[in-house]
Amino acid sequence: MTEQRVISRKTGVEDTDYKWGFELDIESDIAPRGLNEDIVRLISAKKREPEWMLEWRLKAYRHWLKLGSEEPKWANVKFPPIDYQDMIYYAAPRSQADGPKSLDEIDPEILEGFNKLGIPLEEQKKLSGVAVDAVLDSVSVATTYQEMLKKVGVIFCSMSEAVKNHPELVQKYIGSVVPYSDNFYATLNSAVFSDGSFCYVPPGVRCPIELMTYFRINEMDTGQFERTLIIADKGSYVSYLEGCTAPMRKTHQLHAAVVELVALDDAEIKYSTLQNWYPGDKDGNGGVYNFVTKRGKAQGRGSKISWTQVETGSAITWKYPSVILQGDDSVGEFYSVALVNNHQQADTGTKMTHIGKNTRSTIIAKGISAGKANNTYRGQVKIMPTANGARNFTQCDSLLIGDECGAHTVPYIEVRNPTAQLEHEATTSKVSDDQLFYLQQRGLSLEESNYMIINGFCRGIFKELPFEFAAEASQLMRVSLEGTVG
Amino acid sequence: MAESDTDKNAPLLDVRDLHVSVGETDILKGIDLTVSVGEVHAIMGPNGSGKSTLASVLAGRPEFTVTHGKVLYGGQNLLAMLPEERAREGIFLAFQYPVELAGVRTWQFLRASVDAVRRHRGLKELSIREFDKLLDEKREVVKIDPEMLKRSVNEGFSGGEKKRNEVLQMAMLDPTLAVLDETDSGLDIDALKIVAEGVDRFRSPSKAIILVTHYQRILNYISPDRVHVLMDGRIVRSGDRELALELEKKGYDWIRESVAA
């Protein structure tokens, strides 16, 4: 058994179900409420961005205005209208106003906060084998292992730094996978995105350690709009992890992120997420609206993009990590566990768009519903006329706990090439009394028995996670279901 | 089971006038059974006589309702205990139909069970090395390949593999009272020998075994101290090893007629 804790559960906050819910007492630089051109300019100015970046933001903002309140309506989720003028679009710890600093200059309260989350940033305590970019509200506060990565030519830094230090790469690739006009939330993000991580792996380099971004919302009423861009050049490999938590708030918070991945010839990107935003209380008050656009372009021949996600948090999750299989022989994968409890809602899945010849995609989605929660798998497999010999395998399994929850599977398949081969399997099951009794007869409590069955159900996904994340994921399931089973 | 609060002379298991139903149907209609440590009891009977129900009730399967009677285990009220408490106190049920657990590796399942039981008995948790050593020793007896331990519990196992896996679990958990529910059914002669050998090794002056079986052939390998014949929810006859042999020769109809007479 590994003792490693990537996202620690021991925060000292007692008697609550969500143990990451503490608030940091730090001074922040906060933009006035609401969204207008001045706010976009303010964000850009705060980040001392070049003119082209501001122009791009403004284009996105003007496009967003045209969309009015045309949020996507097709997802199986319900929420009251969001007042975009009552939200705060930029918040940064005051001590971090000028972007990441050397560790000596970071506010000790912030360091302590990340320590509590199990993400130590100090040199002597940092996680072994994982480089971390720590993002608090709108800014990146620190990135570890930068020197070591620099030696092998890997660029791993905050998005703000990348815009300043690697403008040619950012300008070339930003919006190339998720254009600013992609969808309502992506457009909003393009206008006001604050920070996020940037990674570039040069040709032929296998990134020697895992890269990780840890996102943390702290301020009240702020939206978090981070933007991540990862480019794997020819023949390179990178494994990237993402974790997220937020304090407990009575009001909802919007998180509208964009992640873009680009894999060139024979490159591979493995992207893993443990999403544990505050899910709201038992009655559905508060919680994060997690409306995220994630897409990868397997652009080069023989390239591969693999998404693995474990989604346990958020009041509402709206998220479809997708792959555009453009290069011949490219591969796209999506492995997902989405767990909803109480009043949580999740509408999540993927989109695999096959363009190149002999492209292959695999989708394995596991949904677990408990309490009064609703879980929807929504997936699209699209085979374009050029995609000779394309293949897809899709498997969607749902597990129900109790009898007030729901599971829905909505697969869309569009085939425009007769040589394509597609398989789709779907199951829905409940934890059976026979299984529970069998485990109890072997000495396990009802609760333990349920976890063992649920973990077994997720095993195919957990094994896709990097080792240190897998134990974490299984712990997270347990915490998320506390009091529901057994 | 705690030794201190147990009367040395008291039986390990004392079933008194036990009545059990499922829904509206009465299945057990007044069972009396006393089992002491060191003993092997065989419960025989035709299909539908209530043998498996008796085994399940001892283990605490929730769908059965005890409508009357009591069961003492080591002097404690067994019926008040949760299934997992009974297991930790040393009652083991080898299932007639072992359950499949998709995605749960057999090794991990065994480890969790052994940990749970040892914790309850105040023993220290075994290290992975100690656990594997014990497992190697026990699995040899029932001829379970280490590869099998990497597979999901009972998933894709043959009938014989499932039964051997039950006996392996018994050996690992080291119970005080083992209840084997038709562990011999559906086995060919070689598999039967392996399973019987595993059970016989388990036999000890400090433990008791209840063998629920339809056929007497397993009794050729595990000689019982007592044989009980269950029919229509009642024990209609008890005897020694000879009763089983006579049953085999004359069939259950013989008992049915002699009971009716």
Image (cartoon, coloured by chain):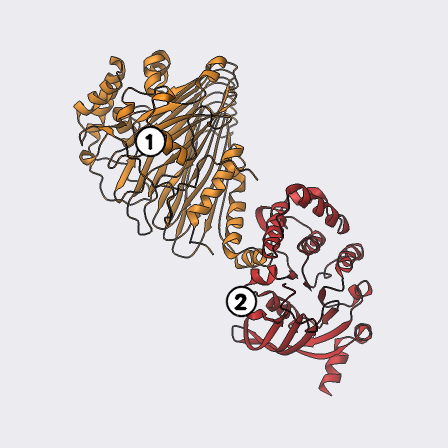
Chain colours: A orange, B red
Considering depth in this image, is A153 or B98 the residue closer to the camera?
A: A153
Q: Nearer the viewer, mark 1 or mark 2?
A: 1
Q: Is residue A175 visible?
A: no
- Name the side, left or right, on which B160 lies relative to A24: right
Q: Residues within 10 Å of mark 1 (few under 14, many from 20)?
A: few
Q: Is residue A197 left or right of residue B175?
A: left
User: What residue appears at the point 38 percent right and 22 percent down from the top-left corner?
Assistant: A103
Q: Residues within 10 Å of mark 2 (few under 14, many from 20)?
A: few
Amino acid carrying mark 1 in the image = Glu
Viewport quadrant of the N terminus of chain A:
top right
Q: Answer with the quarter of the image where residue A248 lies.
A: top left
Q: Chain of mark 2?
A: B
| Residue A143 spot, x, y in % from top left | 40, 22
Residue A109's label in the rendered image is: 1
Q: Quadrant of residue A171?
A: top left
Q: Which mark is residue B63?
A: 2
Circle 1 chain: A
SS category of the residue bearing label 1: helix
Q: Residue at x 77, y 51 (%)?
A: B141
